[in-house]
Image (spheres, helix red, strand yellow):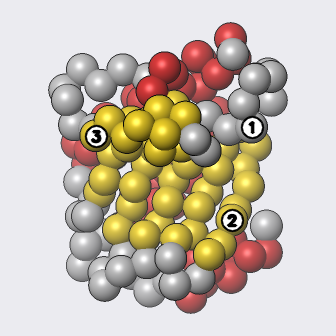
Amino acid sequence: MKELDDFLASWEATAEGNRAAFLALKEHLEGLGAVLNFVPRPGITYSLRASNPAQKKRELFVMVDVIEDTPRWLSVCFYQDLVSDPDGRGDSVPGGLLGEDAICFDMEQADDGQLLYLKRRLDEAWMQAQKA
């Protein structure tokens, strides 16, 4: 994924730590065995889309978006029926993920607690996607 490598090389780390948070989520997805696809839309978003090879119904189970802003921030969106949100940290977004209802978690500043929470949601969606 040369485009992803080029994007990461051009993204300078900032005090918010969102580049490091994005990398941590990417590495977690790779550890699960997710198939990753990078969809750049310069000036808007840079999307890392992950699928589970066992899923049949949908083309992905999570989309990790880098929102082009100053500073850049992250929005991590799941299909609403694939994850829970026991702490109520996410936002329900009707039709928000490829036309289906989603739950999205925004990260404007990297936070270890939020990263752990998101990794748990990734694990949950990964398992649910295998059944879908």
Q: Residue tagged by mark 3?
A: 91
- Residue at 24% of width from left, 20% of height from top? 86
Write the residue at 33% across / 45% down: 105
In the image, residue 81 sits, relative to residue 105, either above or below, namely: above
- Horizontal and vertical percent for residue 85? 30, 25
Instruction: Categorize mark 3 by other alpha carbons within 10 Å: few (<14), some (14-19), many (20+).
Output: some
Query: Along the polypeptide, which appears first: circle 2 or circle 1?
Result: 2
Q: Residues within 10 Å of mark 2 (few under 14, many from 20)?
A: some
Which is in the foreground here, disc 3 or disc 2?
A: 3
Q: Residue at x 50, y 60 (%)?
A: 65
Sequence order check, earlier mark of 3 and 2: 2
Give left or right: position of 113 versus 83.
Answer: left
Packing grade of label 1 (10 A; few <14, some 14-19, many >=20) is some
Disc 1 marks a residue whose amino acid type is Glu
Secondary structure, mark 2, is strand
Residue 74, percent across and down? 39, 61
Label 2 with label 1: CB-CB less than 8 Å: no
| Residue where numbered disc 1 is placed | 59
Quick check: 86 above or below 67?
Answer: above
Q: The residue tagged with tag 3: helix, strand or loop?
A: strand
The residue where tag 2 is placed is 39
